[in-house]
Image (cartoon, coloured by chain):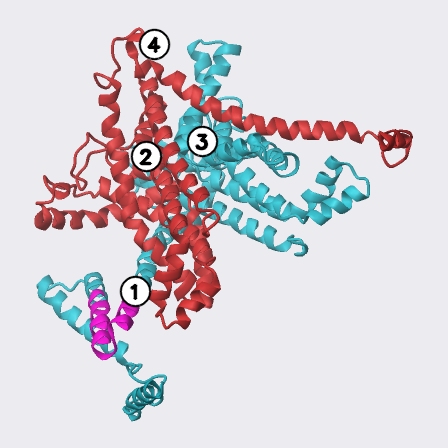
Chain colours: A red, B cyan
Amino acid sequence: MVTESAVEPQRKSSLTAPRGGAAGDKVFSGLSLTAGILILVTLAFVAVFLVAESLPALAPEVFSDQDSIESADNFFEYVWPLMAGTLIASAIALLLATPVAIGVALYISHYAPRAIATPVGYVIDLLAAIPSVVYGAFGMFILAPVMGPIYAWLTENLGFIPFFSDGYSATGRTLLTASIVLAVMVLPIITSLCREIFVQTPKLHEEAALALGATRWEMIKMTVFPFARAGIISSIMLALGRALGETMAVTMVLSQGVFSWNIISAGNTTIPSEIALNFPEAFGMRQSELIAAGLMLFIITLIVNMIARWIVSRHKEFSGAN
Amino acid sequence: MSHTAQNAAETARTQNAPRPRGKSTLTAGQMPSWVWLAVLAGALVLGAGIVALMGGGDFNIVGWLIISAILYVLGMYITTRVMENRRKATDGLWRNLVWAAFIIALIPLVAVIWSVLANGLSTLIANPHLLWEDMGGAAGGDVKFMREGGVGPIAGGFGHALVGTLMITLFAALISVPIGLLTSIFLVEYSRGGWFSRAITFFVDVMTGIPSIVAGLFAFALMELVITTFIGDTPRHLQMVKMGFTASVALSVLMIPVVVRSTEEMLRVVPNELREASYALGVRKWRTITKIVIPTAISGIASGITLAIARVAGETAPILVTAGFVANFNWNVFDDMMTALPVYIYRQMIFPSAAQAPDPSIDRAWAAALMLILIVMALNLIARIIAKAFAPKKTGR
């Protein structure tokens, strides 16, 4: 009480006298708070709009004047081949990319001489920035013609595997080619995230392992991988999110068609490329169908990303993840 | 005790006994350094033999290299295992596999760059007018071009697409930079780690993972709602939804989280001593932020924003569904459709201007792809230069 009353007369002093700054403080903090709220509102809008626009397709009897959707009997029948195609393409892409990407990350962090490691790191970062439409063009005009003869060989010699049976596409514009392009696209993402984690391995752990007589590989197995495990998993999940949502590469490479287990013939499609191909000309119910498919994609990627973040946050204290 | 010591001494002696074989105890038992060359030569010869036998006449160089590489890795493992021990062999195997991963990764990445350069550079040099002309009447030009045997200048160009990318990206940056900047200021300077700031951080992370095509759908649905509510819902009004600004909104959804994350990181490394010194001098909080904190972090913020712009400048799908595509120049983002450079590349490759003469369209698309890569790479380079050149001296924590 005493101190407060003592301070009172000093309000008029030059140190605390308002000089037009108080209003500035309020305006500025208000503005920054508004920006934060705006982001939350935007994300809520994304969810609300997608749901609202896709309701006619999800339940046509209730929310539209039509009995069923246009492309199939019900929405599930329409969307499952798309989801299956999306998941298969992403899964193959990750299977191809992950071992190579982790190898490259290890190469940069533990194997390459310093003079090579730094420029390679830069190049990998730049490659992550190449627009997807360029990868699509590469897959369509350069990679697909190369893959055609390989697919012919696969059908001939490995035709007993369901993925390779029942014919092949001589043009090479198939789901497997699209997956390879996706693998090339997500490789820099996994590599740069993993590299950042690998170099954070405590030097003392590594040196202790080496001092006990471990070879370099044993050192990596004993110190680097346990330390980076959460980070590796979350980087794979982030890459999966990217692969699931990737549009142009698949749209340009794949010659779309109905779902089939054969990944080396024309056919299959993914949600993003279905939207990109049909949305410009769609209206009414068809537009709702496509937005509903987009909602499904949004939910899948949301789950994948949240799992990735959860893994990172759970292991934050013990590892280089995050 | 003395017995153990004697044993140890004996063991040491027996281990030292074969010493003359190696030059020193440190390198004893190791393979000579030329072994890998011998194995490599053997693998190459054997691989050549296998390919020649399997190919039956025509010699496949790619197949030869692949088979030789596999033989080399296996050969090194067996050789090391025989000449040294299993642990050394495993170590060597993984070293070779890591090198192989590096080479495997390099092939497609180099191939992508090379294919764009090889296909785009000559077209762009021979037809510099592609940079400033649009596609008005290009279809007729393409047919004429093909009829004349594919020589001479290519009709049309992608000037309108460059304008479209510039305007759409500019407006996206105008929307997302203030929002992103202010949000990160809120997160770092104003919030005290409460539930609200944690919610923002979490949802910014979620936004990072939104598929770009979903961002496009969102922007389209939002603008459709705005226009039907406030302007009208005739077919002509619905047509209005497809404009450059809708694409800018879509790109902002992708850009804001990137700006927030990078700016937040930069603001957090500004030393607290600077803020405290400023407060001690009686400077108000907002003046401290605008005059002390932001200038200190400006290099990092600017480079983060440049990287975010580079990311969205290459986006295709969200622009395709929101801004459509036209053949002519359009500088107004609020009126009529707009073509962006990535959409131009996609349209020209998939739907050539003249269906009976697709070659000029594909040439134009490759030239545009080269231009797009140059723009994105330049933005990345600028970001690095900004970060390096204007970085504050490292002090404090």
**Dot 3 or dot 1, earlier in sequence:** 1
**Dot 2 or dot 1, earlier in sequence:** 1
Q: Amino acid at mark 1?
A: Trp
Q: Which residue is mark 1?
A: B94
Q: Amino acid at mark 2?
A: Pro
Q: Nearer the viewer, mark 4 or mark 2?
A: 4
Q: Main secondary structure of the magenta part?
A: helix
SS category of the residue bearing label 1: helix
**With respect to residue B388, does A3 lie above or below?**
above
Q: Quadrant of the N terminus of chain B?
A: bottom left
Q: Are marks 2 and 3 on the same chain?
A: yes
Q: Which residue is mark 3?
A: B339
Whole-angstrom CA distance, mark 4 to mark 1, is 59 Å
The chain identifier of the residue carrying mark 2 reads B
The chain identifier of the residue carrying mark 4 reads A
Verify CB contact (< 8 Å) between mark 4 and mark 1. Answer: no
Tell me which residue sits at (34%, 9%) in the image: A63
| Residue B287: % across, % down | 75, 37
Verify CB contact (< 8 Å) between mark 4 and mark 2. Answer: no
**With respect to residue A272, does A96 lie above or below?**
below
| Residue A108: % across, % down | 41, 61
Verify CB contact (< 8 Å) between mark 4 and mark 3. Answer: no
| Residue B228: % across, % down | 48, 12
- Residue B352 marker: 2
Q: Which residue is mark 4?
A: A63
State left or right for residue A162 relative to residue B242: left
| Residue B224: % across, % down | 46, 17
SS category of the residue bearing label 4: helix
Verify CB contact (< 8 Å) between mark 2 and mark 3. Answer: no
Q: Amino acid at mark 4?
A: Phe
State left or right for residue A223 relative to residue B198: left
**Can see residue B304?**
yes
